[in-house]
């Protein structure tokens, strides 16, 4: 597992210690690549103590790796909290331009940990699980930088919801996607929120009502994915897209992302009114004027190194679309 994790981390930047208090920082010295590990620790103990997510960051790219392959990267309450922290920590870093979510192992994520959803845990715990999951998905939409899913394998239920919630989603040809909750008597109602906003209604309904998986090519055709490539090209394509984003203005992308998601649920007149206001606001940004001047003067724009605004309510959404 450690070998696979190190290989996944090396593509865009070497793994670095996370800030104090983060999940990755807490894992220092416990088998995480780049951290000192005790030679006396058994493999089983090292796996149990490995951080649920591993975060690294360099050159404007933040990599968040789901790191519980033994349990198919289930979105347990602990995993969701770790993912939320990795998404929201350090957003004021002006160098941050894009976040990539990937996973160790053949399963991107199998969704919620069903062992946490038994009656023994009670309604209060179940409520925390679903509220935290919704918070993570809404946080992704409210972040001022694009969030990209990198999928090489199976994404099911809330794992499929995570892919659908990301701004961009690239996958290998061997990846598959499903909302199979009906097979265990639990309809994928919350995954259906994100899924139904990514694919046509009848495609979403077939996935939700039958639980049958769709291929990566089908997911691309229906709009769940933005790109599908052979597995050997996935790392390079993700890096290429990330670097393309990194060359752009963070403040402009933050404004544009918010405006695009905000207008999607509105009627035509309201959508155009929102978009028109966004265009006017864009022209007031220093980077908006810098880009226009650079184009006229036939030179490369020099973007401001300032963080774009975190969208209002980031991380504390009520589930309604903006």
Image (cartoon, rainbow, N blue to C red):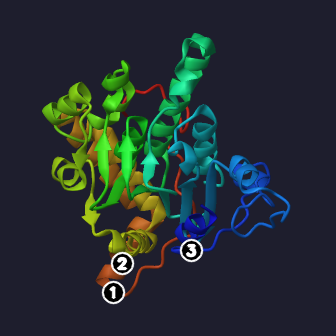
Q: Are marks 2 and 3 in contact (CB under 8 Å)?
A: no
Residue 139, horizontal then vertical, whole percent: 50, 40
The foreground one among 43 and 61 is 43
Is disc 2 placed on a helix, strand or loop?
A: helix
3 vs 1, front mark: 3
Q: Residue at x 16, y 52 (%)?
A: 221
Q: Are marks 2 and 1 in contact (CB under 8 Å)?
A: yes
User: Which residue position is annotated with label 3?
Assistant: 10
Query: Would residue 277 be visible to someone looking at this image?
Result: no
Is disc 1 placed on a helix, strand or loop?
A: loop
Q: Residue at x 78, y 57 (%)?
A: 30
**Image mark for residue 297:** 1
- What's the distance in space between the residues labelled 2 and 3, CA to CA? 37 Å
2 vs 3, front mark: 3
User: Which residue position is annotated with label 2?
Assistant: 293
Residue 170, horizontal then vertical, whole percent: 33, 60
Q: Quadrant of the N terminus?
A: bottom right
Is disc 3 placed on a helix, strand or loop?
A: helix
Residue 36, horizontal then vertical, whole percent: 81, 67
Q: Earlier in the sequence, mark 2 or mark 3?
A: 3
Residue 61, horizontal then vertical, whole percent: 53, 67
Does 220 sit left or right of 152 as displayed? left
- What's the distance in space between the residues labelled 3 and 1, CA to CA? 38 Å
Query: Would residue 279 be visible to someone looking at this image?
Result: yes
**Are there few (<14), some (14-19), or many (20+) residues within 10 Å of tag 1?**
few
């Amino acid at each position: 597992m450690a070998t696979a994790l190190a290989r996944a981390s090396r593509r865009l930047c070497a793994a670095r210690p996370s800030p104090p208090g983060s999940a990755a920082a807490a894992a220092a010295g416990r088998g995480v690549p780049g951290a000192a590990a005790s030679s006396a620790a058994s493999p089983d103990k090292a796996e149990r103590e490995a951080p649920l997510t591993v975060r690294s960051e360099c050159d404007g790219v933040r990599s968040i790796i789901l790191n519980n392959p033994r349990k198919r990267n289930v979105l347990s309450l602990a995993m969701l909290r770790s993912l939320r922290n990795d998404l929201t920590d350090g957003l004021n870093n002006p160098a941050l331009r894009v976040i990539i979510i990937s996973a160790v192992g053949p399963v991107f994520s199998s969704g919620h940990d069903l062992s946490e959803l038994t009656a023994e845990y009670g309604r209060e715990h179940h409520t925390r699980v679903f509220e935290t999951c919704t918070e993570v998905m809404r946080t992704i939409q409210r972040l001022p930088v694009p969030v990209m899913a990198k999928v090489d394998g199976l994404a099911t239920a809330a794992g499929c919801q995570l892919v659908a919630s990301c701004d961009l989603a690239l996958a290998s040809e061997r990846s598959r996607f499903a909302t199979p909750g009906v097979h265990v008597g639990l309809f994928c109602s919350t995954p259906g929120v994100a899924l139904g906003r990514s694919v046509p209604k009848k495609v979403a309904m077939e996935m939700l009502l039958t639980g049958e998986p769709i291929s990566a090519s089908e997911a691309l055709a229906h709009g769940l994915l933005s790109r599908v490539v052979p597995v050997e090209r996935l790392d390079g394509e993700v890096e290429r897209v990330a670097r393309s984003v990194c060359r752009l203005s963070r403040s402009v992308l933050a404004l544009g992302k918010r405006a695009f998601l905000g207008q999607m649920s509105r009627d035509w007149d309201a959508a155009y009114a929102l978009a028109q206001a966004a265009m006017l606001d864009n022209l007031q940004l220093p980077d908006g004027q810098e880009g226009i001047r650079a184009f006229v003067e036939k030179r490369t724009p020099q973007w401001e190194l300032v963080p774009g605004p975190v969208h209002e309510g980031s991380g504390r959404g009520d589930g309604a679309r903006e």
